[in-house]
Image (cartoon, rainbow, N blue to C red):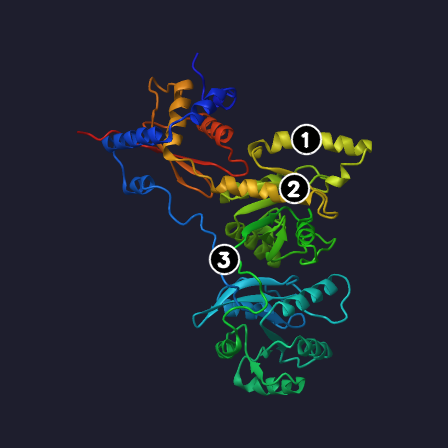
């Protein structure tokens, strides 16, 4: 009887001697054999892309560069004066959430900006209200933190409304900060409205700078003035983003992503509220956990259908995907008190599609740690759900935590380190081809139409994620490819990272 491709998923689990064979391998001899296999490819039709793959791994992948901290410009002001519109104008693209509804921006959000060959970090903040309560009070605290961590402050006022009592209280706070402050008189769309800006001299912050964030009027002149006082290296920001490894925190709304970031940071860095979907923008924070620095990106909760979302939630979902693209490892937060949903699985699949390393954080575990019968039942159902719905990511490190209490949070660091080490891992070409030769000898690919596809040569073309290319004489069954991936994991680790296995079917060159 011929073994089908799918049956390879379950066979050969006990091939422990393969590990022994590879451990005893003479590396130099393995490389010589791989070079001989590589030479046989000259008999096959190869294209320019094949040559690039065979040239080996791109250099510089492993370098993690620590750069001097960019100077920081914070944009503050009361709600709905046009701060986010000004951010978008300075960046030259639509990044910050802009809506007619006041208070859409709730956290401080950092962006990289550039003007006249000068790079700097731009911080957008929620509207500052001095007597705010509840979530508004949290937003006000975020704006105060942003001022503390900035080198220059842009204080935005709606010139068509004029200075309010709130604006005057913000001015008092800014004076205490001792930072250079630029008074930005926004919504001056043409020269006829400039007298409205002049009235803001009364705030005592010096000359108002009339701009129209929506139309761009006056923004270039404002940036020219900022560059005159902006330092080359930030006097307050400790590290430049790009050094510490980047961690995206993902999950459906209200599973505890922001609570996890705050507990890791040891302070309230992100607005946390009972209202689901409080976080609208990804928020980058450098946090020390487990004795090393990490850049955590707390992302907006991914909602069910992007095309049905309105306004702010739509853009937030798009930026969640962008945050994942900029990250190296994703922590997907799952709420153990709720059944694993299709939404949870879709978010995990989004990570797999992006090729990022993956850690699964099962939050609210303290709720299941109590001896009550209903909790024991939920725990039993949860294990069954994990077995059925998350079997395809059984390789991802699992951490049971409580973001609210901080329970087992320290276990997150080894899980992240394991996943990133696997994501960066490279198998030497000699060892990989020896692995393939032993594997095929033990378990040859089944015959298809009287023919048996052969693996001519294999190489790891990239890391982050580990990407392997097999040159073959025919198409390999999906089950056989999964079998190769599973054996790669069993023998070389790769815990916490997807493995990409590509095929290049090549025909022998006609003589």
Image coordinates of residue 241 in percent, x first then y, are 53, 58
Q: Which residue is mark 3?
A: 66
Residue, far right:
372
Instruction: Point out the tag, 1 or 2, that comes first from the N-terminus.
Output: 1
User: Element under label 3?
Assistant: loop
Report whether 293 appears left or right of 481. right
Q: Residue furthest top?
A: 1
**Quarter occupied by the C terminus:** top left
Which residue is labeled 1 in the image? Answer: 383
Label whose residue precedes the other's in the sequence (3 or 2):
3
Residue ID at (67%, 84%):
203
Would you place residue 8 above or below residue 55 in this image? above
Split into 4 quadrants, where in the image is the N terminus? top left
Secondary structure beneath disc 2?
Answer: helix
Q: Position of residue 499 (x, y in %)?
A: 47, 36
Measured Cα–Cα span from mark 1 to mark 2: 20 Å
Q: Position of residue 461 (x, y in %)?
A: 38, 40
At a point 32% along the width and 31% down the height, the residue shown is 34
Residue named by callout 2: 411
Q: Quadrant of residue 450?
A: top left
- Tell me the number on the disc at residue 444: none
């Amino acid at each position: 009887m011929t073994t089908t491709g799918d049956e390879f998923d379950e066979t050969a689990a006990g091939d422990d001697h393969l590990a022994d064979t590879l451990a005893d391998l003479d590396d130099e001899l393995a490389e010589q054999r791989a070079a001989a296999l590589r030479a046989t490819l000259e008999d096959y039709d190869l294209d320019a892309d094949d040559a690039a793959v065979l040239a080996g791994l791109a250099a510089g992948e492993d370098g993690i560069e620590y750069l001097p901290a960019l100077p920081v410009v914070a944009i503050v002001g009361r709600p709905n004066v046009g701060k986010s519109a000004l951010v978008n104008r300075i960046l030259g693209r639509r990044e910050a959430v802009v809506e007619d509804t006041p208070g859409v921006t709730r956290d401080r959000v950092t962006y990289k900006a550039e003007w006249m060959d000068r790079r700097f970090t731009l911080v957008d903040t929620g509207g500052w209200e001095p007597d705010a309560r509840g979530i508004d009070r949290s937003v006000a605290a975020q704006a105060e933190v942003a001022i503390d961590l900035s080198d220059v402050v842009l204080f935005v006022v709606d010139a068509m409304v004029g200075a309010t009592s709130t604006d005057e209280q913000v001015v008092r706070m800014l004076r205490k900060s001792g930072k250079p402050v630029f008074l930005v008189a926004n919504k001056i769309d043409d020269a006829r409205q400039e007298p409205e800006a002049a009235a803001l001299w009364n705030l005592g912050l010096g000359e108002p700078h009339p701009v129209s964030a929506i139309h761009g009027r006056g923004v270039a002149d404002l940036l020219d003035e900022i560059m005159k006082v902006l330092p080359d290296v930030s006097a307050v920001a400790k590290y430049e983003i790009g050094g510490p490894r980047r961690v995206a925190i993902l999950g459906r709304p209200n599973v505890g992503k922001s609570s996890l970031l705050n507990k890791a940071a040891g302070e309230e860095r992100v607005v946390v509220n009972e209202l689901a979907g409080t976080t609208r923008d990804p928020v980058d924070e450098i946090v020390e956990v487990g004795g090393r620095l990490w850049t955590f990106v707390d992302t907006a909760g991914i909602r069910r259908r992007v095309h049905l979302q309105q306004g702010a939630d739509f853009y937030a979902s798009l930026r969640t995907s962008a945050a994942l693209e900029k990250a190296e490892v994703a922590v997907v937060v799952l709420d153990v008190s709720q059944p694993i949903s299709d939404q949870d699985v879709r978010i995990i699949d989004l990570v797999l599609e992006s090729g990022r390393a993956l850690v699964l954080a099962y939050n609210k575990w303290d709720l299941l740690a109590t001896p009550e019968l209903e909790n024991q039942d939920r725990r039993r159902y949860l294990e069954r759900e994990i077995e059925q719905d998350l079997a395809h990511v059984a390789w991802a490190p699992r951490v049971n935590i409580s973001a609210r209490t901080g329970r087992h949070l320290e276990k997150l660091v080894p899980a992240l380190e394991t996943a990133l080490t696997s994501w960066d891992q490279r198998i030497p070409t000699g060892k990989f081809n020896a692995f393939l030769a032993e594997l095929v000898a033990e378990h040859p690919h089944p015959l298809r139409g009287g023919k048996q596809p052969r693996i001519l040569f294999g190489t790891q073309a990239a890391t982050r994620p580990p990407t392997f290319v097999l040159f073959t004489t025919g198409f390999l069954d999906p089950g056989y490819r999964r079998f190769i991936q599973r054996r790669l994991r069993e023998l070389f680790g790769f815990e916490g990272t997807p493995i990409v296995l590509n095929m290049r079917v090549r025909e022998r060159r006609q003589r």
